[in-house]
Amino acid sequence: DGVSNAGKRRVVEARGGKSSNAYHNKSISQTAFIDAYRNLKRNFNVGSYKAIKRNQYNRAIEIANEWKPPVFLCDAINACNQQIKMDI
């Protein structure tokens, strides 16, 4: 659905895109998705993003698109993306 897709796109973008090291780091990915969806649920006071009311759908997409990772996660993403990949 649109809210889920907006959330996924934003999390991928925040990690530096699909070719970044952070995109392929399972721990960073998991933490980012958890935080993004927790933010949505917190903003609408629901247990699941799927429980967001239809009349709030557009606002939910806006909030998903505006999500920013917390400082500790930004630091982890930046550190991970600065590492050089070595093909052996």
Image (tube, rainbow, N blue to C red):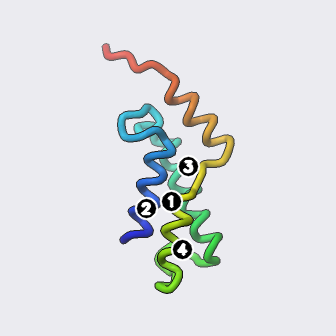
Dot 2 and dot 3 residues touching (CB under 8 Å): no
Residue drawn at (57%, 32%) of the image: 78
Picture disc at residue 65: 1
Report how far apart the C-alphas of labels 2 and 3 lie in the structure. Answer: 17 Å
Comparing 61 with 51, the one in front is 61
Q: Name the spot of residue 6 as percent of width and height, x first.
A: 43, 62
Please give the residue where the numbered disc 3 appears in the rendered image: 31
Quote the CA–CA distance across marks 2 and 4.
11 Å
Please identify, in this view, whether the residue under mark 2 or under mark 3 is nearer the observer. Answer: 2
Residue with the mark numbered 4: 59
Instruction: Name the residue furthest right.
Output: 71
Q: Which is nearer the eye, 73 or 56?
A: 56
| Residue type at numbered disc 4 | Arg
Seen in the picture, residue 31 relative to 84 is either above or below; the reply is: below
Quadrant of the frame with the C terminus: top left
Q: Can you give x and y, in whole percent of width and height, for residue 77 in the image?
A: 55, 36
Residue lying at 57% horizontally and 56% vertically, measured from the top left: 67
Q: Residues within 10 Å of mark 3 (few under 14, many from 20)?
A: few
Number of other residues with Cα within 10 Å of mark 4, as a class: few under 14, some 14 to 19, many 20 or more: some
**Distance between the Cα atoms at labels 3 and 4?**
23 Å
Q: Is residue 56 above or below residue 4?
A: below
Residue 54, how many percent across, how many down?
47, 85
